[in-house]
Amino acid sequence: MERQTGSRAGKDHLQAIKNIGENLFIVILAFYPLRHVQWGLDLMDTGYNYANYTYMGTEHMDPMWLFSTWLSNAAGHLFTKLPGGGTLVGMNIYTGLFVSLLAVLCYLFCTKKLNIRPWAAFLGEMAAVSLCWCPTALLYNYMTYTLFTGCVILLYYGLTKEKKGYLIAAGVCLGANVLVRFSNLPEAAMILTVWFYDFLWAKEEKQGNRKKSGNIQKPENTQKPGGFWKKMLNDTGWCLLGYLAALLVLLGMIHIRYGIREYASGIFRLFAMTDTATDYRAVDMVRNMLHDYTENFYWLIRMGVFLAVGMALALFAGLLKVKGRAAMVVKRIVQAACIVLAALMAGWLYYRDGEGIRVPFCTLDFCDYASMRRPGILFLMLTMFIAAIRIFHPKSRKEDRLLGSMLVLVIFLTSIGSNNRTYPSINNLFIAAPYTLQACFAFLFRYRDKKISRVTIPVFPVKCVLSAFLIICCIQFTGFGLKFAFAEAAGVRDLSAGVSNNEILKNVKMSEEKARWMSSVTAYVKENGLQGQEVILYGTPLTLAIPSLSYYLQMPAAFNPWINLPSYSFEVMEADLHELGEKTPVILLENASALYAEGGRSALTEAGMNESVAEAVAGDKKLQLILSFMDQHGYVQTFRNEKFSIYQCETD
């Protein structure tokens, strides 16, 4: 009795330690996404989105972007009303909580439902969070990932537990996602996984009935006719019910606030956007995404060469007729050779540039995308390879096949609707990363040589190559996660200064140069009472836009804070300027555009500007439109520092 009591106490002690460990994992995953909330000043995407949240509405936003990302704008607008929502750090915390939610939710799903080991799930979630290169200010991305992931989890529960409530909720997630970002429409393709699972279910039911009948040729009590179709139509109907309900409710809210005609007009402009922003065309998005995968075969093939050499050595050793201690010596020599080959492969990947490829496989400059991009793409390919094995393996459970098909679609569909190639898929690995690591660890620790006919297929060379790749991923993903913070589509490298006279930028770390720019322009705006006044912002074509200044200086855009965007056409801008009538908003130009406004093309040349940039500035139709508007209303330069110039109408 004492022995049993001691055994139970020991088990309880181990369980308590396990629970503490899992709770610690959850706490880390909740706070790790907030590690960089004070890092960097981004003049483009971050402040642009926060400006849209702060000044949400058709008065200061482009209606096309207002309605195509309406739900994310509404959520962001709500955050601006919360304590701390009037600062960049506060907004970074609120938006960063979406990543925290994703990491914790997926960790719990992976451990509780998919039976992935807690430490493997934790490592996977840490990798997924570390690869979140996109600033959390872009809620139309992170809300997309959250609702898309929620749909996957709910569909999995709904199908495997046969609960219609989960299916309805999954439909709600996808329906709401269309209002988060209109280009999320292709996510409706997730219904394919429902049909696939229903097919597997019907097939399994039919086989079960045949076994029960004891007569394979003429089974009795077989599945009722129409079983598959009935289940498929039922499951599809419940999903569609949730999908349409979410759409109708949210569109009803838009109709009450703005009118459905305004919404339709904005969405129609979205379809016409591809005339100027060609990288948003469906064909181009798919082609660019597939190009990343095909280009990465350059590295995959060469990694295969190292693997082939290791396999050849192992197979040759297997053909040698040696026994006893000699056989063990030969085995150890081959294993050592495979380890050396894997190490050589890793070294080659770090130091070899691909022929015709602009960047190496990976670098140790963790402030640059090149440190994680190609390992990230290869990780996506590894996930899809593992999922394909699970889908097509004859002994796979239907639940495993369902999950595999879901992950393939998530990886593919996440990049649709974006002009960022495979980067969005790399940013959305919250279920895929734990899934892939669990499968890899199972292979490394459990899989043994397999005998086919009389030939033994060695797996040790494969394990060495896979281990080397996973170690590379560990180094690159961790380094990137700890060092990278987004600013102007690049990584922040200098965090040595801050701005003291700007409430929005309180406690934000940035470079001394940016701090100097922002301090002086903030001082001028405050001294002259320009906060709250409308502004037209224009950056430098090809190199830098400055929409964030609308948020940082608390000056709402006259019609669109990011005029430089190709998706904002010249014709629409011309109409917006015309609608201003006699209004003369403040105009703020980036230095290159200001130089051209003052001295033409010669001023750009004298300033030593890059020839291609100078040509783009001189030939920019939108800039010419702004300069014409300035001449028409008598604008004069009232402020200038080394980066920005402010122009105001003389009569103001």
Image: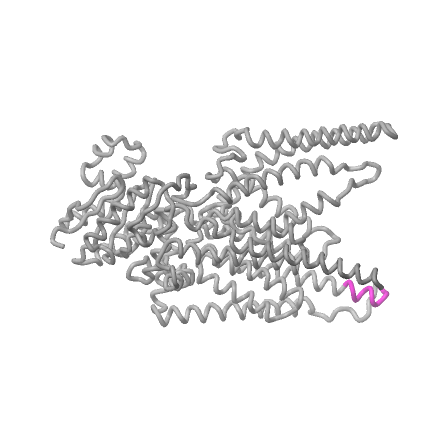
Q: Which residue lies furthest to the right in this view?
A: 324
Q: Residue at 17% of width from left, 46% of height from top?
A: 638
On the image, which quarter does residue 476 sit in? top right
- Expressed as whole percent of the image width and height from the top left, the position of residue 33 reads 50, 52
On the image, which quarter does residue 607 sit in? top left
Compared to 323, does 187 lie above or below?
A: below
Q: Residue at 59% of width from left, 68% of height from top?
A: 166
Q: Which of 38 and 225 is in front in this view?
A: 38
Q: Is residue 461 in view?
A: yes
Q: Nearer the viewer, residue 630 or 201?
A: 630
Q: State yes or no: residue 129 in magenta.
A: no
- Is residue 524 shown left or right of residue 497? left
- Is residue 493 shown left or right of residue 190? left
For the N terminus, the image quarter is: bottom right
- Expressed as whole percent of the image width and height from the top left, the position of residue 290 reads 53, 44
Q: Is residue 287 in view?
A: no
- Is residue 511 shown left or right of residue 604? right
Q: Which residue lies furthest to the left in this view?
A: 651
- Expressed as whole percent of the image width and height from the top left, the position of residue 351 reads 55, 29
Q: Which of 307 and 50 is in front in this view?
A: 50
Q: State yes or no: residue 210 in magenta.
A: yes
Q: Residue at 37% of width from left, 68% of height from top?
A: 260
- Expressed as whole percent of the image width and height from the top left, the position of residue 421 reads 48, 45
- Is residue 12 shown left or right of residue 607? right
Compared to 383, does 226 lie above or below?
A: below
Which secondary structure is most common in the magenta stretch?
A: helix
In the rendered structure, which segment of residues is drawn in magenta? 207-215
For the C terminus, the image quarter is: bottom left
